Amino acid sequence: MEHLEVPPWIAMQFHHLLQKLGISLSERDAIALTMVLILVVAVSVLFGLYRNRYRIVPTPVQQVLEGYYEFIRGLCVDMIGEERGERYVSVIGTVGLFVLLANLMGLIPGLASPTSNLNVTAGAAIFVFLYYHLEGLRTHGLLGYIRHFMGPVWWLAWLFLPVEIISHLARVLSLSVRLFGNIFGEDTVILILFMFIFPIMAPLPVMVLAIITSFVQALVFVMLSVTYIAGAVAGEEHH
């Protein structure tokens, strides 16, 4: 269905610029990269504007941001623990915000969802994969973290180690493909309805469903990320 997509104008200009610079990207990857850059700049500007504008009586935007912070903080503290959970609020909050806004971008006319590109979702999944392993190494040290993969008794390590390695590698595939499949599917359905059926009313119910799906997929991505971090930094009594 890729041939049905009308590339955003700004993405095509960026694609031509990359070609002039000798950087070879497919049209679809160039669109995804452009959308990611737009998202990063927009969010950076928004947070820069509101960083020093907190009010005793919060504005609607401030209420949304504070509610999101409290939700992420509660999730991290509940799943990782009071002492360690606070450390991961900023990382998990950033990942969750990126995934959510990237999911919703495709509903804005003239834009596309970066998460409908497998390279973007794989990049986010690889970041989470590397991050929780680095946190596990930082918390337990090399030998202590390796013991997490050895099972409850040393003489079964030969069995548990390959199973654990395959399981952890599968997490990258699970995170990336699940998010990509859902967002790509909903964007494709909306595009088909918009182009070939009734361009005004028909896509609206699907767009409402797409908004719900975008939130659900962002929540799933965040909860799995927190779960992986919790498993990596957990002490022996929790493992």
Image: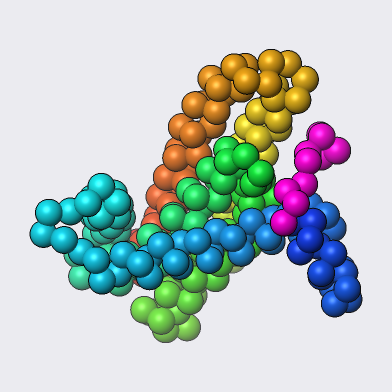
Depth check, front residue: 201 or 158: 201
Where does the magenta region start and end?
Answer: 1-10
Magenta stretch: includes residue 174: no
- The image shows residue 138, relative to residue 184, as above or below, that is below
Location of residue 24 with respect to 77 vertically, above or below:
below
User: Residue 3 colored magenta?
Assistant: yes
Q: Is residue 192 above or below residue 160?
A: above
Q: Can residue 42 be seen by looking at this rendering?
A: yes
Residue at image position (87%, 69%) is 19
Q: Give how far across and how far down residue 89 sits, in percent.
A: 32, 64
Task: Quadrant for the N terminus, please.
Answer: top right
Q: How many marks?
A: 0
Q: Could you tell me residue 142's position as x and y percent? A: 47, 83
The image quarter containing residue 126 is bottom right
Colouring used for the render: rainbow
Location of residue 49 (image quadrant): bottom left
From the viewer's side, name the closer residue of 83 and 22.
Answer: 22
Residue 115: x and y in percent read 62, 49
Horizontal side, residue 70 vs residue 158: left or right: left
Q: Where does the image place residue 100, in percent across and percent down from the top left?
A: 48, 48
In terms of depth relative to the viewer, which is nearer, 181 or 195? 195
Residue 40 vs 65, above or below: the answer is: below
Can I make out residue 168 in this image?
Answer: no
Q: Residue at x 45, y 79 (%)?
A: 137
Residue drawn at 26 percent across, 71 percent down? 52
The quadrant in which the C terminus is found is bottom left
Q: Is residue 172 left or right of residue 117?
A: left
Drawn side of residue 213 relative to residue 152, left or right: right
**Residue drawn 45% across the image and 38% down it:** 216
